[in-house]
Image: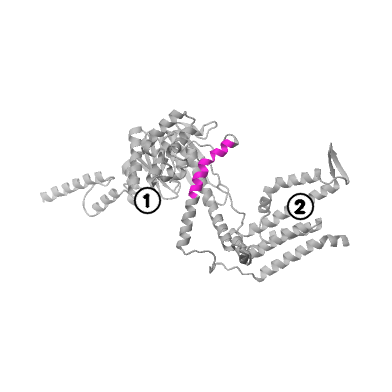
Amino acid sequence: MELFKGLVLGQYVPVDSAVHRLDPRTKILAALGLLGVIFAIRGFAGLAVLTAVLAAATLVARIRPGYVVRGVRPLLWLLVFAFALQVFFGEEGGHPLARWGPLVVTRENLSQAAFYGWRLLLLVFSTTLMTLTTSPVEFTDGLERLLRPFQRVGVPAHDLAMMMTIALRFIPTLLEEAEKIMKAQMARGAEFARGSLPRRARALLPLLVPLFVSAFRRADALAVAMEARCYRGGEHRTRMRELRLRPRDYTALFLVAAAAALALVSPAVWRGR
Amino acid sequence: MIRCEHLTHIYGRGTPLQTQALTDVSLTIAAGEFVGIIGATGSGKSTLVQHFNALLRPTAGHVYLDGGDLHARGVDRRRVRREVGLLFQYPEQQLFEETVSADVAFGPRNLGLDEDEVQMRVRRALTLVGLDPDRFGPRSPFELSGGEMRRAALAGVLSMEPRMLILDEPTAGLDPTGRREILGHVGRLHRERGLAIVLITHSMDAVARLAGRVLVLDRGRLVAEGGPREIFADPARLQALGLGVPQMTLLGQRLRERGLPVRPDILTVAEARTAVLEALRVRGRSHGAL
């Protein structure tokens, strides 16, 4: 009955590396930029370039490949599904390679499917790499700082970041509590994993009601504790960790931009040969 | 009734958070017995008792209820939980229904009893914990006082009509009245209903007053077991384990240090009174003889 034990939240792998030490803003921007580039790429060569760059970054970050694979795994079925869909129901015509009854596999569709699949993998790879090397707290800090320019148009950057930080902080607490309440109800003969779906949904009530009650109570207590320490939003707050872009951040951003440019022009280079 | 053999429990095995909570614990608890479990925070008390009703599965070793292994194939764990009731720490957190009656009925309904029987059990359980079924039954559990909520939660376990009741720090966070009421009801359940009671507590006085036998846990190991007089006879050792002795035992010890020859195994106020009067009489006589 160790329901949530060993469940690691977020994927952050705390090791010391050049990538870990980068400013979170650098990593967020790089990941966002790469997302755009990945969608703009039209040929396999570009994907190969980006894959190589991300693999190199993984090495530098001293992240074991296993962690990256684990990040991709939840998408495996989506990937297989999208691939199959593209192979069998892609565009008509082209060079047939194989045929089962009404299903025809053409070279064009196969290559299209591979391209889309690879692209999807890269999308996940780049964001996974960011979450693997950036702790949730750093991430929210970076996000707050990046959103600050938009405060003028009414984006509550600080409040959003604070809410996110609090939410992240309380996920383990709530999980622990959920486990305790579940056990308490099981001690009273409750069953959570048996019966039809509606029955199971109803069985969750004895878990959810106490969990909500306690979450609200906690929220109340936290609000009081924050106010008791004169918290009143983001104005005039100083921070313990000042984010500062260092030379290494500019270097990293430059490298990513260079890789992106290379990836974008690579099909042309290929053809030129 | 409950027997543990070489019980070991490890949380999060194979993860970086792996912790050994229990190591090679063997013990027996007889039907109708009142056992106190004491031990510092993190000594494995809660982990231990969660094995008694099969909420936790031993990493190694076995737990038997009436001779049957709890984790043998085909054992109905709901039946086990009907026999062995467990009241968690801060049990008021488990209340969820709209009325106290409905909440107390949760357990019996899960047992698949018919509605008449359920209602009878609800009334019986509420009466046992001193909550008038007609007055408290229709109220929302969330508008009760702390002590009342806890007694309602206790009723929610009693309505399963278990033969053994485990209480994990039932008095934590209650005011003196609430504490006295809960422990009073627990004592009565033991005396009048013959329930086997397992009481986890940090109150040495409660253990001294109520328990017939005491188990001492330290960092996942069972380091001592015996009658309360025996256990509390060695205050230095208990203090080394982060525990204490009952107030009156301490009083006796201090008095002896100051030269009043009181018995060393006092547990309760009543015993202290007799012992002190006895010691004074003895001293008075010897003074008279001089």
Is residue B197 depicted above or below A221 in this figure?
A: above
Q: Nearer the viewer, residue A183 or B140?
A: B140
Q: Helix, strand or loop at disc 2?
A: helix
| Left or right position of A229 against A156 | left
Q: Tell me what residue is drawn at x 35 percent, y 46 percent.
A: B178
- Which disc, if any, is residue A118? 2
Image quadrant in which the N terminus of chain B is located = top left
Q: Tell me what residue is drawn at x 53 percent, y 33 percent.
A: B72
- Which disc, if any, is residue B243? 1
Is residue A91 depicted above or below A149 in this figure?
A: above
Is residue A233 depicted above or below B276 in this figure?
A: below
Return the chain for callout 1: B
Q: Nearer the viewer, residue B54 or A195?
A: A195
Quarter location, residue A249? bottom right
Q: Badge 1 local density, few (<14 within 10 Å), some, or many (20+)? A: some
Segment tinted magenta in the rendering: A198-214
Q: Badge 2 local density, few (<14 within 10 Å), some, or many (20+)? A: some
Q: Helix, strand or loop at disc 1?
A: loop
Task: Residue type at mark 2: give it.
Answer: Trp
Cα–Cα gap, marks 2 and 1: 62 Å
**Which residue ends up furthest to the front in the rendered image?**
A153
- From the image, give the main secondary structure of the stretch colored magenta: helix
